Amino acid sequence: SAVISQKPSRDICQRGTSLTIQCQVDSQVTMMFWYRQQPGQSLTLIATANQGSEATYESGFVIDKFPISRPNLTFSTLTVSNMSPEDSSIYLCSVVGTGGSGANVLTFGAGSRLTVL
Amino acid sequence: GESVGLHLPTLSVQEGDNSIINCAYSNSASDYFIWYKQESGKGPQFIIDIRSNMDKRQGQRVTVLLNKTVKHLSLQIAATQPGDSAVYFCAETPYGNKLVFGAGTILRVKS
């Protein structure tokens, strides 16, 4: 399965600033997914990033707050804009792999843990 | 490393015992159901999946059971080991490639 590298692995940010998270995959993939994992919670899909088109955002997430770039088939960035303490989370990049039953199983990066003060 | 499951339900088992982790899912249209394991400081890792037309599937030391009547999924881990300590998430695929994750359960293995 694909190997995913995320940067930064963790950061402490000041309220009102923005931070861009990078996701690099070792193979070309059509779709990349960005998830958020708030403290003590499960994973929630933010958006799907396709190369050559605008990202598709899930309900509750907007482009102005979480702009996404997808310049090629191996790379994507997620920016968390105008951060507040409520944005403190782990942000995870994922791509489609293959599961034992034929499911399109997602492979995840290690995540980027952001703490907003 | 930091825990990702500070507020999640916890299952504590003795090393060598079997573990059963349960999950209730919400969408009858899901084609696949998947179990993930998340260790501290890491992203979720695929364990096993099951298609909606099956009710049981076995892997190495793990078995997934699907009860569509009551929308219930379980993960059984045989002879639980300390390395099995992690947060376990179920996920379903109601919308193609998008995964919808369940709440998660912390598994603690006592030596």
Image (cartoon, grey):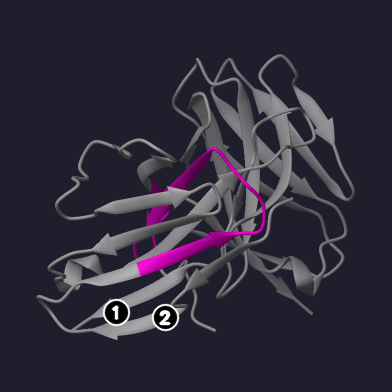
Q: Closer to the N terminus: mark 2 or mark 1?
A: 2
Label 2 SS: strand
Residue B34, image quadrant? top right
Residue A40 on image: x %, y %: 39, 65
**Front residue (pair A53, B86):** A53
Residue B90, image quadrant? top right
Q: Is residue A86 left or right of residue B62?
A: left
Q: Is residue A82 left or right of residue B67?
A: left
Instruction: Specify few, some or many for label 2: CA neighbours under 10 Å numbering under 14, 14-19, or 20 or more.
Output: some
Going 53% across and 31% down the picture, which residue do you hit?
B97
Hey, what amino acid is under mark 2? Arg
- State yes or no: discs 2 and 1 in contact (Cβ < 8 Å): yes
Label 1 SS: strand
Residue assigned mark 2? A10
Going 34% across and 62% down the picture, which residue do you hit?
A38
Is residue B61 shown in magenta? no
Residue B93 lies, with reference to residue B108, above or below; the image says above
Question: Disc 1: which chain?
Answer: A
Q: Is residue B41 left or right of residue A91?
A: right
Is residue A26 shown in magenta? yes
**Front residue (pair B13, A12):** A12
Residue assigned mark 1? A115
Residue B33, label in figure: none
Q: Is residue B60 left or right of residue A56?
A: right
The magenta region covers A21-44
Residue B32 on image: x %, y %: 63, 26
Residue A9 lies, with reference to residue A36, above or below; the image says below
